Each structure stands twice: as structure tokens, then as C-alpha cells.
Image (cartoon, rainbow, N blue to C red):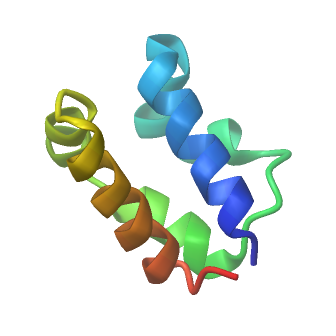
Amino acid sequence: MSTQSVETVLSRAMSDAVFADLLFSSPDQALAGYDLSTDEIASFKALSRVDFDKVNGAGPEERRSFFSFMTAQGGGG
């Protein structure tokens, strides 16, 4: 399990709209090549686009909280 990989995917999705679209339309394709556990992949698949868009438009503190939540969901570490 790689907290760094979760953060990399989240950062990329927040800065790259095409990747974010792929993450929500075809998560297996978007996440291929990232060192993610089964639980981390499941966390991304469970993430709703609405919740992601809310956080993406939020300030730095909310984003940090979201990153922490996502890494904890996947087991982090």
C-alpha cells in the first residue's frame, strides 16, 4: 500500500481534468500503473464525482483533510 501513490493519483486528478474524467469513467484504466492496493483501488472506485468536485474546488485545508481521509481509507502506509 502506498500513501504516496494515492496522493499522486489525487493530485493528478485535481490538476488534470482529462485524467479526472478517466478516473470516474474508467477507473481501472486510469489507475493502471500506479502502485495501489486492492483497498486503495476500491476507495477510488467508491469516490463520487460530486464529492471529488467539491473538494477540488475547496481550499488547501479541506484538500489536506480529504487526502488524509483517502489515504486512511486505503490503509495508507
Residue at 21% over, 50% down: 62
Residue at 59% over, 52% down: 7
Q: Could one spot residue 21 in this view of the protein?
A: no
Which of the two residues, 56 or 50, is positioned nearer the viewer here? 56
Which of the two residues, 71 or 51, is positioned nearer the viewer here? 71
Q: Is residue 6 left or right of residue 14?
A: right
Quarter of the figure that contains the N terminus? bottom right
Q: Is residue 65 left or right of residue 53?
A: right
The number of callouts visible is 0
* Outermost residue, front side: 61
Quarter assignment of residue 38: bottom right
The x and y percentages for residue 33 are 85, 45
Residue at 54% over, 78% down: 74
* Outermost residue, bottom side: 75
Q: Could one spot residue 20 in this view of the protein?
A: yes
Which of the two residues, 28 or 10, is positioned nearer the viewer here? 10
Q: Is residue 10 above or below residue 25?
A: below
Quarter of the figure that contains the C terminus? bottom right
Q: Is residue 15 above or below residue 77?
A: above
The x and y percentages for residue 20 are 45, 27
Q: Is residue 36 left or right of residue 20?
A: right
The x and y percentages for residue 39 are 58, 80
Quarter assignment of residue 56: top left
Residue at 46% over, 58% down: 44
